[in-house]
Structure formats: structure tokens, C-alpha cells
Image: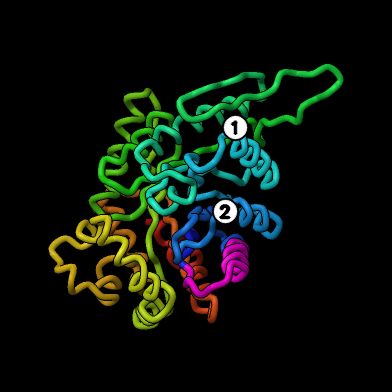
Amino acid sequence: MFQTPFMRPTRSPREVFDWAVGQAEVCDRLGFTEYWIGEHATMSYESIPNPELVIAAAARGTDNIVLAPGAHLPAYHHPGTLALQVSWLTHVTQGRYILGVGAGAYPSDGAVRGLKDLSNNHKMMIESIDIMQRIWQGKPFHYEGAFWKAGFPEAVDGHEWRDPRPYGGKVRLAMAGLSPNSPTLAYAGKNNYLPLSVYAGEAAIANHWETYEAAAKEAGHAVDRSDLRVVRDVVVADSDAEAKKLAVEGGMGQAWLNYLLPVYKQFGLLQKMLPGHDLNDVDVDTLAEHVWIVGSPDTVTEKLASIQERTGGWGTTLVYGHDYTENPGPWNHSLELLTTEVAPKLQDA
């Protein structure tokens, strides 16, 4: 699951927190393999500023699922602080952790930190990752770069510093791409980080993998398409009609109508999702038919298999989390059908 989360702005922070932690526990119980939590400072529908708090709470109530910020935005964190926090969480989760990082796309999130221009965010992210990797070695150094000053202290007689090395000695990193020929995914491929494709149309899935693969091979890294994660809106019910009703009339439909449609139009992404459509005529029925993956277990299995074939495929589907707090039963049943009915058929295909 990718719990960004798309929660109604009327939800209180406690309601959002409880829902996010509870969904991690549901997903773990049902056999989901990963649970990603977004980081946003100002967006009304994406309302978790501190994914690490959800991860820490979820670590206590889950046993197997991997927990991951999706993604921390290093331009908005001092790398020393973030490195120590991440290392600690790898131990709290006992290795059930992936560090997702991103440059940050929303100007308002930058403005809160006094950044009016986000053009350096990618460079800040790269420098921050380099610093964090050095801190995780636990060896003394001092660094003064273009954006950050950081280091690890020299030993002092009679006093031992706490070990900053992560659980197992290494942190798995992942990066998400949204735009065509994503520079972030190219950087991920160059550095052998896990790739994540945020859905922007079927052509984008293929392009994202090609961008990642080319950079990885140029750097001498072997790649496996099963490492690719793709984020999609998915709802499953016992019948096609029930699934469409749950999607259109529930939290998914509300989030798209009130938030995602305007955002995707603003960033020019809707055209790529719906080539040949008049964007003025796009409504939830159009989305249910052409963008979301909605239906009975057989229908969803067929849709996912067809998309995999057309795009070249991927290894892990990340299901967007939506706001079904008032009546979670049908939504949780959708998650259950994904693991008990859909996934086994795709694995056997």
C-alpha cells in the first residue's frame, strides 16, 4: 500500500494517524509485503508531515510488512538528523524498512522551509544522501558542501559514541519518478536504488523502467524488473458493480474529484493518462473505466495482467490508500480480495 494518504481535509491529525497506523496493521495481517507513508507539509488531502511517527507506531503492531517513508524529502531535513533517525528506525523495525527519498514537487512545502525556488532540491537530495551514507559508516569525518555542513565526531577518551550504523549494516533506498525520462529514476539506476513509478499513464511505466535500466546498466549494475514498484488506484469487490460503487462514491472518488483531478491537470499529467479524451469531460465514471483498476477479482486480475503485458511488467503493485474511515469494512474486504483472489492468479499466470 502507498498511504500518501488521500484523507479528507476535515479529518483531524489524530484521525489521520489512527487510520494510517490501523491500515498498516490490516495490510500486515492480510499479507501485504510493503507499506509506504507519504511526507507532505502543506497539502490538504495528503496530510502526514511525519511518516516516521506512523512507522514507529506501526512497528509495534505488525510482524512482517516492510515499512517505508514514501518519501522523505532530504532538501527539508538536515542530513545528520535524518541519518540518525533512519538508522534508529531500521533497528526499531528490525530491518523491515526501506528509505524512500524524493526531491519534493510542491512549492508550498518548500515555502514553509523558506525555499521559494525548488530548482536546487535535486542537488540538495544528492548531497544529503552522500552525507547520510558516510554517517552510517560510523567513522569520524567533517564535511562542508554546497548546501550542508555535517560529520561524525572523533572519539573521546572515556566516552563511547552511540553506534549510528543501521540494522544489518545497510539501508535500502528507493526513489520515485513521475515525469517522463525522470532524472530521479536515472539517479536511482546509477546508484542501484529501488525504482518506484508513480502512475502517470501506461506509457510512463515503460518509460520509467527504460530510464532506470539505461542508467543502471551504464553504471555497471545488473537490474531485475521485479524490483520495479508501480502505484495504482485499485478497488476490488465481489462484483464489478459493487467495486465501481465503492470507488466512485467512496474516498477514492472524493479524492479524485476534489483534489487529484485539479492537481493532475495543473501538472499536465491527465492528458498522458487519458490520451484522446476531452479533459473537460473527465468525471469519476471516466476514471473508473480508464484510469483506476476497479472490479471483481476476475476483472481486476485481467486488467492488471493486460497492463503488465502492454507495459513490460513490474514486480510490486502499490495500492493507493484512500479515506474509508467511516465504513472501513468494504475497503478492507477489497484489500483482502487482492491478497486472496487476485495476487495468487497473477503469480500463477
Q: Determine whether, in the image, residue 55 is placed left or right of residue 254.
A: right
User: Is 93 placed above or below 9 here?
Assistant: above
| Label 1 – label 2 distance at C-alpha | 20 Å
Residue 66 position, x and y percent, is 58, 50
Circle 2 crowding by C-alpha within 10 Å: few under 14, some 14–19, many from 20: many
Query: Residue at 51% of width from left, 54% of height from top?
Result: 36
> In what quadrant of the picture does the C terminus appear?
bottom left
Residue 194 position, x and y percent, is 44, 40
Which numbered disc covers residue 127?
A: none
The dominant secondary structure in magenta is helix
Tell me, yes or no, if residue 155 can be seen here: yes
Please name the amino acid that badge 2 sits on. Answer: Pro
Q: Determine whether, in the image, residue 86 is placed left or right of residue 259.
A: right
Q: Are marks 1 and 2 in contact (CB under 8 Å)?
A: no
Tell me, yes or no, if residue 226 can be seen here: no
Tag 1 secondary structure:
loop
Q: Is residue 245 magenta?
A: no
Q: Is residue 15 magenta?
A: yes
User: Is 317 placed above or below 16 here?
Assistant: above
Which numbered disc covers residue 170?
A: 1
- Observer-side mark, 1 or 2, equals 2
The residue identified by callout 2 is 51
Residue 131 position, x and y percent, is 54, 28
Residue 182, picture quadrant: top left
Tag 2 secondary structure:
helix
Residues drawn in magenta: 7-26
Please name the amino acid that badge 1 sits on. Answer: Lys
Q: Determine whether, in the image, residue 105 is placed left or right of residue 47.
A: left
